[in-house]
Image: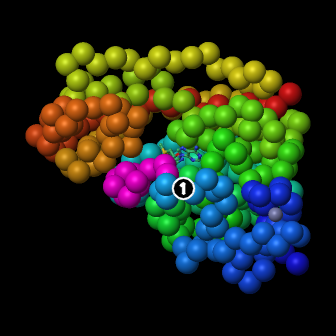
Amino acid sequence: MIMSGFVCPVCSGALENRDKSLVCEKNHCFDLSKSGYVNLLMSQKSGNHGDDKIMVHARRDFLDKGYYSALRDKISETVLKFSNNSSVILDAGCGECYYTSDFYEKLQSAGISAAVLAVDISKNALACAKSRAKGIEKAVASIFHLPLAEASCDIIVNVFAPFCGEEFSRVLKKGGIYIQIIPLENHLWELKEAVYDNPYKNEVKEYAIEGFELARCSELHRKINLGSCEDIKNLFMMTPYYYKTSEKDFKKLDQIDSMKVSTEFAVLAFRKL
Ligand SMILES: C[S@@+](CC[C@H](N)C(=O)[O-])C[C@H]1O[C@@H](n2cnc3c(N)ncnc32)[C@H](O)[C@@H]1O
Ligand SMILES: [Zn+2]
């Protein structure tokens, strides 16, 4: 009997892997999709949630070009530092599993047989994750209602996805690690200058979360050379500014076919007290 790392979203019971479905003791059954994820989202009324296909493809195309490979390596290094053979690791808001698949593969190469789970509310993102590392258990689910048992997780990774302190505390074990990525003051400054008349620097809050202590902090400062208009627009579409920007401002990027852009991140690891 192979058990899933997820629990039933209806009754919170353990889920068993049976053929192409996950089934709990009460016979609530969730089929695996062709793309290899299971849909554990309870509110399925309006169909699609989270990032749409256009945003998912923009991010995939941008990340596949390696512009954020230094960030990816730093995230994987941080995950490996806190992992061992019995670790259960969750990527919360995993998108297309760009970062998830990298730390999964590096864990495997290091001979660490940790279990890796990934959730995202967007089916489009998880469908796009299909070709990435097969050993990751993927589910459509919300960060605000995680299909995981209390104190079942050793590490949670959150790369630019929503934060829910209550849920993260619930599913993390005592002493468990929460890894969060924060954009620093000048992150994407030149891109913002190209779009806005009066761009603002990012406000960086104190590195603190209630109920956690800071266990590790590394900062990355790097200029990247964007080599085409498509790459520049794809990067802009990955940011929260995209939602708030008028078409007229976004179109300013049509005139630019290369740009040197500052990227600045803090990779933070917090330990649950
Ligand atoms: C900026 S993207 C980051 C994706 C991925 N971590 C990466 O960096 O490549 C944010 C992701 O969070 C997902 N998301 C938004 N709200 C969510 C929620 N309530 N629960 C789970 N995922 C959510 C979106 O669908 C999207 O894939
Ligand atoms: Zn059930």
The part of the image, by quadrant, that contains residue 3 is: bottom right
The answer to whether residue 6 of the structure is visible from this angle is yes
Residue 127 percent location from the top left of the image? 50, 66
Residue, x 71% and y 48% (percent of image)?
146
Q: Is residue 52 magenta?
A: yes
Nearer to me, 64 or 205: 205
Q: Is residue 218 magenta?
A: no
Residue 149 percent location from the top left of the image? 84, 51
The part of the image, by quadrant, that contains residue 158 is: top right
Please, what secondary structure does the residue beneath circle 1 have? Answer: loop
Q: Is residue 185 above or below residue 139?
A: above
Amino acid type assigned to the residue bearing label 1 in the image: Lys
Looking at the image, residue 42 sits to the left or right of residue 97; the answer is right
Looking at the image, residue 84 sits to the left or right of residue 74; the answer is right
Nearer to me, 141 or 89: 141
Task: For ligand 2, give the image quadrant.
Answer: bottom right
Residue 58 percent location from the top left of the image? 34, 53
Residue labelled with disc 1: 45
Q: What is the quadrant of the C terminus in the image?
A: top right
The answer to whether residue 3 of the structure is visible from this angle is no
Residue, x 79% and y 31% (percent of image)?
271
Residue, x 64% and y 56% (percent of image)?
41
Q: Which residues are magenta?
A: 49-59
Q: Is residue 74 above or below residue 261?
A: below
Residue 92 percent location from the top left of the image? 64, 47
Nearer to me, 37 or 29: 29
Residue, x 69% and y 81% (percent of image)?
20
The part of the image, by quadrant, that contains residue 258 is: top left
Tell me the chief SS of the magenta region. Answer: helix
Give the residue furthest to the front.
45
Give the residue furthest to the bottom.
19
